[in-house]
Amino acid sequence: MRIWYGPPHTVNCFHAHCKGRTWEDIRPKQDQWTNYIPGQEHSSNGNGHKEANTGLPSVILGGQLRDSRDESLQYLGKSEEQEPTIFVQSGRLVQIGRDKDNKTVVMAMGVPEIKNALTKAADFFTLRKVPHTENEYAPKPASPPKEIAEAILALSPSKWPFKILEAIVETPVIRPDGTILQKPGYDELTKLYYAPHKDMHACKVPECPSEEEVQNACAVLNDIIADFPFVDQSDYANMLALIVVLNPKVRKT
């Protein structure tokens, strides 16, 4: 079966009895087989939409590209709701990954990365005619087409259902409201992704430090600048702030 995108949108099959049929003749069969995998039982997700045992929704290929794109993007967005790894940064799609040193990095997403993400968000199928039947079609597993990935990347960033990412941080950060970002993962308030440095996994900053903890922290900082001749107390305070903000070694202490 061959399907053309754009007018006239027709279906061309090599069977004689299919001559003259259009996409509207095939569409009911596509709807019938949506979320179906041969040989597997199905369960409802609560809204009448069936899912296979993989736990993933199904995308039946062969209709308008815009429809397949929107459906695929919808499922990809839903798969990123709980623990997001795909973000929008500076008007482009990026993904959280790790380099060869196992350090968390921001990776630009192209067609291969989008296709890989789609395979984790949904199952893709094409429809094939069942031999020796007059009007029966069965789904055949397929890979996410590159055209869908290209169409997703071509969308305006405002159409992407992903969160905005400002940067990756490796140490705890004070939020604008005074609370501390120290839970690994994405933070909605700051739009930062906290990926603790290997030396920071055991670090837990208390929300309300005791007097002893404050004194111990000050002692670490004082040891660094004890012999520096400050003009007055304000210069000393500014230096402490710069050390904490700019020196990652101190922040890991």
Image (cartoon, grey):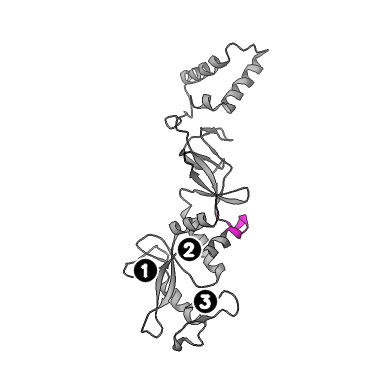
Q: Nearer the viewer, residue 230 or 19?
A: 19
> Looking at the picture, which amino acid does disc 3 mark?
Ile
Residue type, mark 1 in image: Ile
Span highlighted in magenta in the image = 153-161
Residue on which disc 3 sits: 3
Q: CA distance from mark 2 to mark 1?
A: 16 Å
Left or right position of 147 against 125: right
Between disc 2 and disc 1, whose residue precedes?
1
Give the numbered dot on residue 144: 2
Q: Is residue 162 above or below residue 15?
A: above
Q: Residue at x 59, y 75 (%)?
A: 6
Q: Kindly identify the residue that appears in the image at 54 percent across and 18 percent down.
A: 221
Q: Is residue 155 magenta?
A: yes
Task: Please name whichever residue, 12 or 79, is drawn nearer the observer in this view of the structure.
Answer: 12
Q: Which residue is mark 1?
A: 37
> What is the x, y in percent for residue 16?
45, 88
Asked whether the beta carbons under mark 2 and mark 1 sit within 8 Å of each other, the answer is no
Q: Amino acid at mark 2?
A: Pro
